[in-house]
Image: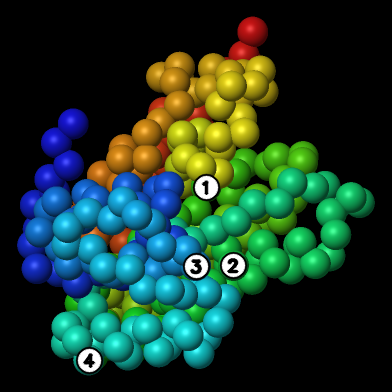
Amino acid sequence: MNPFISGLKDKVILVTGGASGIGLATARVLAASGARVVCADLQQSQDLPQGCEFRRLDVSSEKLTQELVASMLDRYGQIDGLVTSAGISRVGDLESMALQEWEQVLQVNLTGTMLSARAVASHMKQRRQGSIVAIASINGMLGNPSNLAYCTSKGAVIQMVRSLAAELGPCGVRVNSISPGYIHTPMTIMLDEQPVGQAFEAMHLLKRAGKSQEVGNAVAFLLSDMSSFITGVNLPVDGGFSAAKVIAI
Protein backbone atom coordinates (compact mmCIF):
# COMPACT_ATOMS: atom_id res chain seq x y z
CA MET A 1 0.00 0.00 0.00
CA ASN A 2 1.45 3.36 -1.03
CA PRO A 3 1.42 5.73 1.97
CA PHE A 4 2.04 8.90 -0.03
CA ILE A 5 -0.66 11.59 0.07
CA SER A 6 -0.06 14.69 -2.08
CA GLY A 7 -0.56 18.18 -0.69
CA LEU A 8 1.25 17.61 2.62
CA LYS A 9 4.85 18.45 1.80
CA ASP A 10 6.42 20.81 4.38
CA LYS A 11 3.22 21.09 6.40
CA VAL A 12 3.73 21.10 10.19
CA ILE A 13 1.31 18.77 11.93
CA LEU A 14 0.73 17.93 15.59
CA VAL A 15 -0.53 14.39 16.30
CA THR A 16 -1.66 13.70 19.84
CA GLY A 17 -1.51 10.05 20.80
CA GLY A 18 1.12 9.85 18.09
CA ALA A 19 3.37 7.21 19.65
CA SER A 20 1.14 4.18 19.08
CA GLY A 21 -1.84 2.77 17.23
CA ILE A 22 -3.75 4.99 14.83
CA GLY A 23 -1.76 8.07 15.85
CA LEU A 24 1.58 6.46 15.01
CA ALA A 25 0.25 5.03 11.74
CA THR A 26 -1.02 8.49 10.81
CA ALA A 27 2.36 10.02 11.64
CA ARG A 28 4.04 7.53 9.32
CA VAL A 29 1.77 8.41 6.41
CA LEU A 30 2.24 12.13 7.04
CA ALA A 31 6.03 11.86 7.28
CA ALA A 32 6.19 9.72 4.13
CA SER A 33 4.20 12.45 2.38
CA GLY A 34 6.72 15.13 3.31
CA ALA A 35 5.13 16.64 6.41
CA ARG A 36 6.99 17.58 9.56
CA VAL A 37 5.24 15.76 12.38
CA VAL A 38 5.28 16.24 16.14
CA CYS A 39 4.05 13.10 17.91
CA ALA A 40 2.78 14.04 21.35
CA ASP A 41 2.09 11.26 23.84
CA LEU A 42 2.65 10.13 27.40
CA GLN A 43 5.23 7.52 26.43
CA GLN A 44 7.74 7.63 23.61
CA SER A 45 7.67 5.12 20.78
CA GLN A 46 10.89 3.47 19.67
CA ASP A 47 9.49 3.24 16.17
CA LEU A 48 8.99 6.86 15.11
CA PRO A 49 9.77 7.33 11.42
CA GLN A 50 12.14 9.89 10.00
CA GLY A 51 10.42 13.27 9.85
CA CYS A 52 8.75 12.82 13.23
CA GLU A 53 9.78 14.10 16.62
CA PHE A 54 8.42 13.06 20.00
CA ARG A 55 7.13 15.45 22.63
CA ARG A 56 5.70 14.30 25.94
CA LEU A 57 2.15 15.51 26.58
CA ASP A 58 -0.82 14.87 28.83
CA VAL A 59 -3.69 16.09 26.65
CA SER A 60 -5.90 16.70 29.68
CA SER A 61 -3.56 19.51 30.79
CA GLU A 62 -4.37 22.89 29.24
CA LYS A 63 -1.06 24.34 30.43
CA LEU A 64 1.07 21.60 28.89
CA THR A 65 -0.90 21.67 25.64
CA GLN A 66 -0.53 25.43 25.29
CA GLU A 67 3.20 25.18 26.05
CA LEU A 68 3.72 22.50 23.41
CA VAL A 69 1.93 24.53 20.74
CA ALA A 70 3.93 27.64 21.69
CA SER A 71 7.20 25.72 21.38
CA MET A 72 6.18 24.36 17.97
CA LEU A 73 5.41 27.88 16.77
CA ASP A 74 8.78 29.09 18.07
CA ARG A 75 10.56 26.31 16.20
CA TYR A 76 8.59 26.04 12.96
CA GLY A 77 6.70 29.34 12.76
CA GLN A 78 3.50 27.57 11.73
CA ILE A 79 1.11 24.73 12.52
CA ASP A 80 -0.85 23.54 9.51
CA GLY A 81 -2.66 20.55 10.96
CA LEU A 82 -3.80 18.88 14.16
CA VAL A 83 -4.79 15.26 14.69
CA THR A 84 -6.38 14.43 18.05
CA SER A 85 -5.74 10.71 18.35
CA ALA A 86 -5.04 10.46 22.09
CA GLY A 87 -7.74 8.36 23.70
CA ILE A 88 -8.52 5.77 26.35
CA SER A 89 -11.32 3.28 26.98
CA ARG A 90 -12.78 1.90 30.20
CA VAL A 91 -15.36 -0.88 30.04
CA GLY A 92 -18.43 -0.38 32.19
CA ASP A 93 -22.17 0.22 32.10
CA LEU A 94 -24.34 2.79 33.87
CA GLU A 95 -24.42 1.04 37.23
CA SER A 96 -21.03 -0.63 37.32
CA MET A 97 -18.71 2.12 36.06
CA ALA A 98 -16.77 3.97 38.73
CA LEU A 99 -17.26 7.72 38.59
CA GLN A 100 -13.49 8.21 38.47
CA GLU A 101 -13.24 6.10 35.30
CA TRP A 102 -16.13 7.97 33.68
CA GLU A 103 -14.44 11.30 34.38
CA GLN A 104 -11.05 10.05 33.20
CA VAL A 105 -12.40 8.91 29.82
CA LEU A 106 -14.21 12.20 29.21
CA GLN A 107 -11.19 14.21 30.37
CA VAL A 108 -8.86 12.54 27.87
CA ASN A 109 -11.15 11.81 24.91
CA LEU A 110 -13.41 14.87 24.97
CA THR A 111 -11.74 17.62 26.97
CA GLY A 112 -8.33 16.66 25.57
CA THR A 113 -9.66 17.07 22.04
CA MET A 114 -11.12 20.48 22.89
CA LEU A 115 -7.92 21.69 24.57
CA SER A 116 -5.78 20.68 21.61
CA ALA A 117 -8.12 22.41 19.17
CA ARG A 118 -8.24 25.52 21.34
CA ALA A 119 -4.45 25.66 21.53
CA VAL A 120 -4.03 25.85 17.73
CA ALA A 121 -7.20 27.76 16.82
CA SER A 122 -5.91 31.32 17.26
CA HIS A 123 -2.85 30.66 15.11
CA MET A 124 -4.85 28.94 12.38
CA LYS A 125 -7.47 31.70 12.35
CA GLN A 126 -4.76 34.33 12.05
CA ARG A 127 -3.25 32.54 9.04
CA ARG A 128 -6.74 31.81 7.67
CA GLN A 129 -5.82 28.22 7.01
CA GLY A 130 -5.47 24.93 8.82
CA SER A 131 -7.05 21.51 9.18
CA ILE A 132 -8.09 19.71 12.36
CA VAL A 133 -8.98 16.01 12.34
CA ALA A 134 -10.40 14.40 15.46
CA ILE A 135 -10.37 10.63 15.89
CA ALA A 136 -13.86 9.64 16.96
CA SER A 137 -15.30 6.10 16.65
CA ILE A 138 -18.20 4.12 15.27
CA ASN A 139 -19.00 3.70 18.97
CA GLY A 140 -19.72 7.42 18.93
CA MET A 141 -22.24 6.86 16.14
CA LEU A 142 -23.92 3.75 17.54
CA GLY A 143 -24.71 2.62 21.07
CA ASN A 144 -22.84 -0.05 23.00
CA PRO A 145 -24.26 -1.48 26.22
CA SER A 146 -20.97 -2.07 28.00
CA ASN A 147 -18.88 0.93 26.99
CA LEU A 148 -20.86 3.92 28.23
CA ALA A 149 -18.08 6.44 28.84
CA TYR A 150 -16.21 5.73 25.61
CA CYS A 151 -19.36 5.88 23.45
CA THR A 152 -20.46 9.10 25.13
CA SER A 153 -17.07 10.76 24.73
CA LYS A 154 -16.70 9.84 21.06
CA GLY A 155 -20.28 10.89 20.24
CA ALA A 156 -19.55 14.23 21.86
CA VAL A 157 -16.36 14.56 19.79
CA ILE A 158 -18.39 14.17 16.59
CA GLN A 159 -20.77 16.91 17.70
CA MET A 160 -17.85 19.10 18.77
CA VAL A 161 -16.38 18.77 15.28
CA ARG A 162 -19.61 20.04 13.72
CA SER A 163 -19.68 23.01 16.08
CA LEU A 164 -16.00 23.84 15.52
CA ALA A 165 -16.44 23.56 11.75
CA ALA A 166 -19.22 26.15 11.96
CA GLU A 167 -17.15 28.40 14.22
CA LEU A 168 -13.84 28.21 12.37
CA GLY A 169 -15.01 27.79 8.78
CA PRO A 170 -15.37 31.54 8.11
CA CYS A 171 -11.70 31.86 9.11
CA GLY A 172 -10.57 29.27 6.56
CA VAL A 173 -10.00 26.49 9.10
CA ARG A 174 -11.45 23.06 8.36
CA VAL A 175 -12.53 20.61 11.08
CA ASN A 176 -13.49 16.98 10.44
CA SER A 177 -13.57 13.67 12.27
CA ILE A 178 -12.78 10.06 11.45
CA SER A 179 -14.78 7.22 12.98
CA PRO A 180 -12.77 4.00 12.79
CA GLY A 181 -14.40 0.60 13.01
CA TYR A 182 -12.62 -2.45 14.36
CA ILE A 183 -8.96 -1.60 13.78
CA HIS A 184 -6.04 -3.73 14.90
CA THR A 185 -4.28 -1.52 17.49
CA PRO A 186 -2.76 -2.02 20.96
CA MET A 187 -6.16 -0.97 22.39
CA THR A 188 -7.95 -3.86 20.65
CA ILE A 189 -5.34 -6.58 21.07
CA MET A 190 -7.34 -8.19 23.88
CA LEU A 191 -10.18 -8.86 21.41
CA ASP A 192 -8.22 -10.00 18.39
CA GLU A 193 -8.08 -13.71 19.25
CA GLN A 194 -11.35 -13.96 21.15
CA PRO A 195 -14.78 -15.02 19.86
CA VAL A 196 -16.21 -11.56 20.59
CA GLY A 197 -13.54 -9.99 18.39
CA GLN A 198 -14.17 -12.45 15.59
CA ALA A 199 -17.91 -11.77 15.80
CA PHE A 200 -17.31 -8.02 15.70
CA GLU A 201 -15.08 -8.46 12.66
CA ALA A 202 -17.81 -10.43 10.88
CA MET A 203 -20.22 -7.50 11.30
CA HIS A 204 -18.05 -5.40 8.98
CA LEU A 205 -19.15 -5.64 5.35
CA LEU A 206 -15.58 -6.30 4.20
CA LYS A 207 -15.38 -9.22 6.67
CA ARG A 208 -12.11 -8.15 8.23
CA ALA A 209 -10.69 -5.75 10.73
CA GLY A 210 -8.97 -2.63 9.47
CA LYS A 211 -5.32 -1.65 9.61
CA SER A 212 -4.08 1.45 11.37
CA GLN A 213 -2.52 2.74 8.14
CA GLU A 214 -5.91 2.60 6.43
CA VAL A 215 -7.18 5.07 9.01
CA GLY A 216 -3.97 7.09 8.71
CA ASN A 217 -4.48 7.42 4.95
CA ALA A 218 -7.96 8.88 5.50
CA VAL A 219 -6.68 11.29 8.15
CA ALA A 220 -3.87 12.41 5.86
CA PHE A 221 -6.35 13.08 3.06
CA LEU A 222 -8.45 15.32 5.33
CA LEU A 223 -5.32 17.20 6.38
CA SER A 224 -4.13 17.69 2.82
CA ASP A 225 -5.01 20.27 0.20
CA MET A 226 -6.83 17.50 -1.67
CA SER A 227 -9.76 17.93 0.75
CA SER A 228 -9.82 21.72 0.65
CA PHE A 229 -13.64 21.93 0.33
CA ILE A 230 -14.47 19.37 3.02
CA THR A 231 -15.37 20.44 6.56
CA GLY A 232 -17.83 19.42 9.26
CA VAL A 233 -17.74 15.80 8.09
CA ASN A 234 -17.57 12.62 10.16
CA LEU A 235 -16.00 9.98 7.90
CA PRO A 236 -16.48 6.33 8.94
CA VAL A 237 -13.43 4.21 8.16
CA ASP A 238 -15.11 1.02 9.23
CA GLY A 239 -15.24 -1.49 6.41
CA GLY A 240 -18.94 -0.79 6.02
CA PHE A 241 -19.90 -1.54 9.63
CA SER A 242 -22.11 1.54 10.00
CA ALA A 243 -23.68 1.20 6.52
CA ALA A 244 -25.73 -1.95 7.13
CA LYS A 245 -26.77 -4.15 10.00
CA VAL A 246 -25.06 -7.52 9.67
CA ILE A 247 -25.58 -10.22 12.28
CA ALA A 248 -22.57 -12.44 12.82
CA ILE A 249 -23.44 -16.14 12.64
Element type at mark 3: loop
> 179 or 75: nearer the eye?
75
Color style of the picture: rainbow
- The kind of residue tagged 3 is Leu
Q: Which residue is mark 2?
A: 108
Residue name at image x 45 percent, y 26 percent: 209
Residue name at image x 31 percent, y 38 percent: 214
Q: Is residue 117 left or right of residue 224?
A: right
Q: Which residue is mark 4?
A: 74
The image shows residue 218, relative to residue 230, as above or below, that is above
> 48 or 146: nearer the eye?
48
- The kind of residue tagged 1 is Ser
The image shows residue 206, relative to residue 189, as above or below, that is above
Element type at mark 1: loop
Residue name at image x 63 percent, y 59 percent: 153
Q: Which residue is mark 1?
A: 137
From the top left corner, tell me how far across and down residue 32 is, in percent: 14, 51
Element type at mark 4: helix
The image shows residue 109, relative to residue 65, as above or below, that is above
Q: CA distance from mark 3 to mark 2?
A: 12 Å
Q: CA distance from mark 4 to mark 1?
A: 33 Å
Residue name at image x 44 percent, y 21 percent: 208
Q: Earlier in the sequence, mark 3 or mark 2?
A: 3
> 244 or 22: nearer the eye?
22
The residue most toward the top is 249
Q: CA distance from mark 2 to mark 4?
A: 26 Å
Decide if residue 165 is in sight here.
no
Q: Which residue is mark 3?
A: 42
Which dot, 1 or 3, sits closer to the camera? 3
From the top left corner, tell me how far across and down residue 38 is, in percent: 28, 69
- The kind of residue tagged 4 is Asp
From the top left corner, tell me how far across and down residue 59 is, in percent: 51, 74
